[in-house]
Amino acid sequence: MLPATAPLPSGAHFQLFAQDGKSAISWRLLSGNNRELGRGVVSHPDLETCLLAIKQMLESLERLSADIRRKDAHLWQWSLLDDDDVVVTSSHAYDRRIRCIQALDHFRLQAKDARPGDGVMLTGARRWMHAAAGRRPLQTGSRIDASTSAEARLPRAN
């Protein structure tokens, strides 16, 4: 039994996945209840390279810059950038800017203690492998710079 003062383990873990045994490997961070918190944007040729990318992301997590962006008129998404290169992105869009920011903060917090899960999940039937009809990728929209955007200086009513 854990002492009352010990922090509870989050259960967050990195899941590695590929379409089949010959495909590139990607990663995503899952919470303790298996909800996706964020994902790497680059696929890797093998397991070792993917694990190295996770390690490098974690080592640079505090210095990665956040990009909060409108996806559509009423949706928001976050990304973490190393210079101008997107390293991690949100798994879905959020209906409020504040929820998007909270999700980014939650990703950063959970990623620090997360470890890779066992092996690579092989699946060709997952939604991240095949774009649903009528859906656009999350990387659309215009970048909003909080330091210069007039909208960013307005009080939020979220």
Image (cartoon, helix red, strand yellow):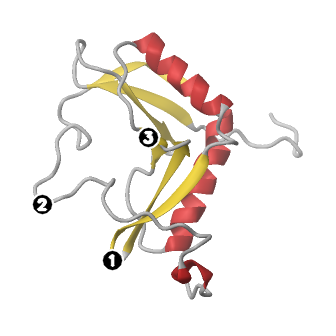
Asked if residue 31 can be seen in this view, the reply is: no
Mark on residue 73? 1
Residue 21 percent coordinates (x, y): 25, 13
Name the quarter where the N terminus is drawn. top right
The image quarter containing residue 147 is bottom right
Callout 2: helix, strand or loop?
loop
Read off the residue under disc 3: 39
Instruction: Decide which of tag 2 and tag 3 comes sooner along the chain.
Output: 3
Query: Is residue 117 shown to the viewer in this render?
Result: yes
On screen, residue 106 above or below 27:
below
What is the quadrant of the C terminus in the image?
A: bottom right
Under tag 1, what secondary structure? loop
Q: CA distance from mark 1 to mark 3?
A: 23 Å
Image mark count: 3
- Tag 1–tag 3 contact (CB < 8 Å): no
From the top left corner, tell me how far across and down residue 104 is, in percent. 57, 55
